[in-house]
Amino acid sequence: MNNIESNNIETNKNVFDYKTIYENCLITENKDYQKPEFLLKYDKSEVFFKQNLSVITGHAGSGKTFAITLLVTELLKPNIELHNISIETANDIKILWFDTEQAPFRVNQIRQRIMHLSNANNENFKIFSLKDIKTEHRNEFVQAAILQSDANFIIIDGIRDLIKSINDEAIATEIIDNLQSLLVRKNCHILNVLHTNKSNDNLRGWIGSELTNKSDTVIEISKDKSGNNGIFEINFTKIRSTPIKDSLKFEVEYDEINNVALPKWYDNNGTTGTDGMNEIKAKKNNLMNLK
């Protein structure tokens, strides 16, 4: 986007101001550097820091959307205890989700799931279906929407659709630069979603390489590696805070009576259910027609 006023280093992206950059970027003992606020804490590990990027990846059909649905539910409905492992979140989290792949009907199903699972205030969660928007307009809209929003947790599902070529190094760098500028200006966290290559577990293209390098956290979603059918894993493969060794697991339960598919946590002992999950099961008969 052109000529957007910045609250930080550069007042015009096309103007190089050496003095301003020098004064703002020089690290000295006379400045007070505050640790960015984290938005989610799993056990002792803090993740999703404000002013940082993260990325969720996995092969097609690995359960990425369901995994994000569970994480968003935790952010909107904090402090769930999962078999003595605490999941804590910051207060007053507002979420903005951009879906670039699915049609409005499917994206509305995501919204309905999250509203039912979290009992959240609708004003704290907004989701957009951008499938029918031109690529260049998607990119401009996402940046403009973030600038005009007070959301502090942003999801771009999938960032690949903000550019025409995933193997264009210059465009990939520009996209990441723009996102990093937004992070600081809006004091938010941006979670990106990108598929892995079919032949390996690397993120696709130059945009994938840039995201891997610049992200504070990289999360891989996969089917359970121990062979449990219908179980999915959330693995934190890169994290700059305290490492998370154990994976989070979830399953997707389908209720044929209500025609609804809901993700729910699954622990390593093969049992499901916490106070929060029991509440969800009790509500299932009242759920809307979701898939």
Image (cartoon, grey):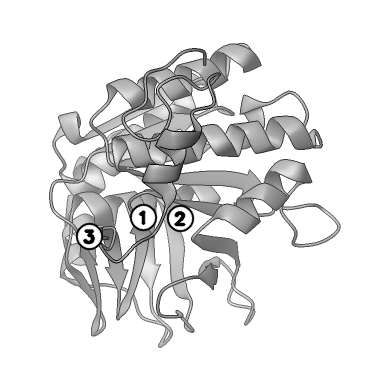
Which dot, 3 or 2, sits closer to the camera?
Answer: 3
Where is residue 70 drawn, in percent x and y? 36, 55
Kind of residue sitting beneath label 1:
Leu
Question: Mark 1–mark 2 contact, CB under 8 Å?
Answer: yes
What amino acid does circle 2 point to? Ala
Dot 3: within a 10 Å radius of its alpha carbon, few (fewer than 14), some, or many (20 or more) residues?
Answer: few
> Which residue lies at the image location 34% right of the left edge and 62% below the top edge?
28
Q: Nearer the viewer, residue 172 or 250?
A: 172
Task: Point out which mark residue 67 bears.
Answer: 2
Q: Is mark 1 on a helix, strand or loop?
A: helix
- Marks 1, 3: nearer the viewer: 3
Q: In which quarter of the image is residue 82?
A: bottom left
Residue carrying label 3: 32
Residue 87 is drawn in which quadrant?
bottom left
Find residue 100 and name its label. none
Q: How far across and down, in percent of the image, does residue 244 sit?
A: 45, 79
Q: Can residue 60 be seen in this view?
A: no
Q: What is the number of the mark on residue 70?
A: 1
- Disc 3 residue type? Asp
Q: Where is residue 151 in the image (x, y as percent from the top left)?
A: 26, 35
How many residues crowd mark 1 within 10 Å: few (<14), some (14–19), many (20+)? many
Q: Separation of disc 1 and disc 3 at Cα?
A: 36 Å
Residue 222 visible? The answer is yes
How many other residues sit within 10 Å of disc 2, few (<14), some (14-19) or many (≥20)?
many
Give the answer, above or below, for where 89 lies relative to 211: below
